[in-house]
Image (cartoon, rainbow, N blue to C red):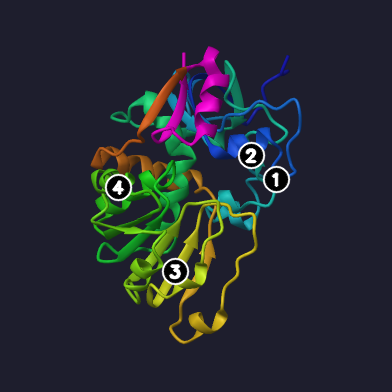
């Protein structure tokens, strides 16, 4: 029994839930922060089934989504500035709480995002983690439509990054270690591809990119990628690499290059992302499994063969 619904919370009847590599990391306690029993699932789609007495911005039966974070303090300077995703008291959906592999989920109403008409509910789940993660830096760093952007890794995050960046107006280059994915990358929105296993190809891209978005969780030769940045270019991480970055400051200093990283977006930016996706008909490429087959779905994601996200449905 979850008890009485908090005055500022809502209850969501879950219809769909995406499965993210972060779910696998939590299942395996890869980050040392898992609490068992653990209910995964932080790409939640459903309808509002109950409202706390103080919730005024949502309504019963409304289609909504929930991502990595389920609660904020709502009073710190970051929250007051709209940067809820940076709140030091933010509570992750699957850390000390129960996630979306369930019939119902509860969350602070501030963290719950309405899904606009025109967004397909059966593929919307990954937008609330993967989508918001790759969309966030486009807004945060004011990426220009004229920018030349590289994307490292064409997987669950990377395939959405290609779609967003193409619609944003950028010249998009996909770095991929798989020759078989070159044609797929083009279909997803890449104008060019570079074989990330070929250092000579990477060297030929010297001083080329204004922005590189890394979506991978493996260690690469980051100093080599830094050479492909133009002056004032930025290498930005949204994929979580557990190994420390080995970066030569000298190669950054002379050209004002920078390295940065970011988490999922704020709820406000998620709403902007969904409107942008609706306008440009962007949706994740997914494979669907029934909730009863959740273990098979998790195994499919672990295999590395999923194209490109996995979603559970009723």
Instruction: Give the mark, 3 or 2, whose residue is nearer the N terminus.
Output: 2
The answer to whether residue 287 is above or below residue 162 is above
Considering the numbered disc 3 on the image, is that residue within a helix, a strand or a loop? Answer: helix
Q: Mark 4 points at which residue?
A: 185
In the displayed structure image, the side of residue 28 where residue 138 appears, left or right = left
Instruction: Give the mark, 4 or 1, whose residue is nearer the N terminus.
Output: 1
Q: Name the residue under label 2.
A: 25
Q: Which residue is drawn at 40% across and 31% down?
A: 124
Considering the numbered disc 2 on the image, is that residue within a helix, a strand or a loop? Answer: helix
Q: How many marks?
A: 4
Most extreme residue toward the bottom is 254
- Highlighted range, magenta: 290-314
Q: Position of residue 43 (x, y in %)?
A: 51, 32
Q: Is residue 291 magenta?
A: yes
Along the viewing direction, whichever of 89 and 195 lies nearer the viewer? 195
Q: How crowded is mark 4: few (under 14 residues within 10 Å), some or many (20 or more)?
A: many
Label 4, label 2: how far apart the Cα atoms are: 26 Å
Tell me the mark number nearer the camera, choosing from 4 and 1: 4
């Amino acid at each position: 029994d979850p008890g009485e619904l908090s005055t500022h919370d809502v209850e969501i009847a879950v219809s769909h839930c995406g499965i993210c590599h972060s779910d696998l990391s939590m299942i395996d306690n890869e980050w040392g922060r898992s609490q068992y029993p653990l209910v995964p699932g932080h790409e939640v789609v459903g309808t509002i089934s109950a409202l706390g007495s103080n919730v005024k911005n949502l309504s019963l039966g409304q289609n909504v989504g929930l991502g990595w974070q389920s609660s904020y303090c709502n009073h710190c300077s970051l929250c007051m500035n709209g940067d809820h995703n940076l709140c030091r008291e933010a509570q992750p959906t699957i850390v000390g709480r129960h996630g979306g592999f369930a019939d119902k989920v509860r969350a602070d109403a501030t963290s719950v995002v309405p899904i606009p008409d025109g967004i397909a509910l059966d593929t919307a789940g990954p937008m609330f983690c993967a989508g918001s993660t790759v969309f966030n830096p486009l807004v945060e760093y004011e990426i220009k439509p004229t920018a030349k952007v590289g994307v490292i890794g064409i997987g669950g995050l990377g395939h959405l990054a290609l779609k967003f960046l193409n619609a944003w107006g950028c010249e998009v280059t996909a770095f991929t270690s798989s020759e078989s994915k070159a044609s797929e990358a083009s279909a997803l929105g890449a104008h060019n591809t570079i074989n990330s296993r070929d250092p000579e190809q990477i060297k030929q891209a010297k001083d080329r990119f204004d922005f590189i978005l890394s979506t991978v969780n493996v260690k690469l030769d980051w100093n080599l990628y830094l050479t492909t940045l133009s002056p004032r270019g930025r290498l930005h991480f949204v994929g979580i690499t557990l190994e420390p970055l080995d970066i030569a400051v000298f190669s950054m200093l002379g050209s004002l290059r920078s390295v940065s990283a970011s988490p999922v977006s704020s709820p406000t930016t998620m709403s902007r992302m969904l409107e942008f996706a609706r306008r440009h008909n962007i949706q994740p490429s997914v494979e669907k499994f029934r909730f009863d087959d959740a273990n098979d779905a998790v195994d499919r994601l672990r295999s590395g063969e999923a194209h490109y996200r996995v979603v559970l449905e009723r």
